Image (tube, rainbow, N blue to C red):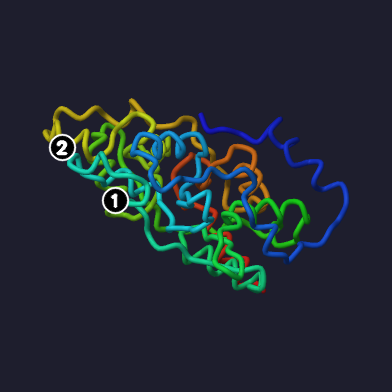
Amino acid sequence: MNAKLNSDKSFCQHLYTIQSVLKLDIKTLCIPYAHILAPDDSYAVVRRKFLESRLHSLPVVDERSKRCYGIVHRSNLLIISASRTFATAKDLVDPAIEATIDTPFKHAVSLLIAGKGYAVLVNQIKHFECLLGVESLLENLLAANDKFLEQPIKRVMVEDVAYVKRGESVERVWRKLLTSKVSALAVIEDDGRIIGVVSEYDLLARGYARPRFESDNRVGNSPSIETLMSTPPFTVKPGDPLRIAVEWMASKNIGRVYVVDDDDRLLGVVDRLSIAKAWLSSR
């Protein structure tokens, strides 16, 4: 039931027709057409922009002054209490990690890692220029046909995978996402086979955030995970080249791919940040 790389592979085929060189230019890390939150955007508007963009983090910027108030992470929306649902974007921000046009490329990548995958590019007078994202690094690696992508996935994967079992309640999933400090959980059977994935996006899209649980705080009333998990999961094998996982992430706009054995039992995970860390350590 796992998704296989077939016609989707053509998504990136045109990138490999010629060998090119990775451009170590910080501007190539900008996310084109990224949504920007206005300081006074309501909770509902912030939620809608996150769902439309499918990004993990969005900057809060005053369009007139170009001042950046900070970054809102998607997880911030899941923990806001019912008494704060009237909060605006500027009430939800965390400090933004900043880079400038003079920031060396490798250091910019390290800033992305420190910022959960995102940072903001500002000019000399601290005006917002663009949102920098780790997904842009992966797209650059594909475009450059970088040899880094030819190594086996097992060299990059993380074996300590956050997961939940089939049948667990959505409330327990919500709590585990927060305590595990990850943006998605694998859903597995008792024998370790992966059957789906549930993410912050899934919870947010279906309205399962803290206010929902505060109004109905009995675990037994919370629906089971099968009602919102994404299926089939995107999986790879330990010996597959890393390129396959990155192609999945780019073509499907997903943040991670799970590593399984021949029986689909969960072995590990490779995500955007683990790839960025491995790339940085290889330089």
Q: Specify whether 132 is left or right of 62.
A: right
Q: Specify whether 154 is left or right of 10.
A: left
Q: Residue 164 carries which label?
A: none
Q: Residues within 10 Å of mark 1 (few under 14, many from 20)?
A: some
Nearer-the-camera pick, 72 or 18? 72
User: Residue 106, percent across and down?
Assistant: 63, 71
The Cα–Cα distance between marks 1 and 2, rounded to whole angstroms, is 16 Å
Nearer-the-camera pick, 150 or 131? 131
Mark closer to the chain start, 1 or 2: 1
Q: Quadrant of the C terminus?
A: bottom right
The residue carrying mark 1 is 178
Q: Can residue 155 be seen in this view?
A: no
How many tags in the picture? 2
Q: Please give the name of the residue rendered at 40% of the width and 35% of the height, measured from the top-left corner.
A: 45
| CB within 8 Å, label 1 to label 2 | no
Kind of residue sitting beneath label 2: Glu
Q: Is residue 122 visible?
A: yes
Q: Please give the name of the residue rendered at 58% of the width and 64% of the height, measured from the top-left corner.
A: 122
Q: Please give the name of the residue rendered at 65% of the width and 57% of the height, measured from the top-left corner.
A: 29
Which quarter of the picture shows residue 235?
A: top right
Nearer-the-camera pick, 44 or 239? 44
User: Residue 34, percent across and down?
Assistant: 57, 45
Query: Which dot, 1 or 2, sits closer to the camera?
Result: 2
Q: Residues within 10 Å of mark 2 (few under 14, many from 20)?
A: few
Q: Please give the name of the residue rendered at 40% of the width and 51% of the height, measured from the top-left corner.
A: 73
The residue carrying mark 2 is 214
- Above or below: residue 29 compared with residue 252: below
User: Residue 31, percent across and down?
Assistant: 62, 50
Secondary structure at badge 1 equals: helix
- Above or below: residue 90 compared with residue 204: below
Residue lying farthest front?
64
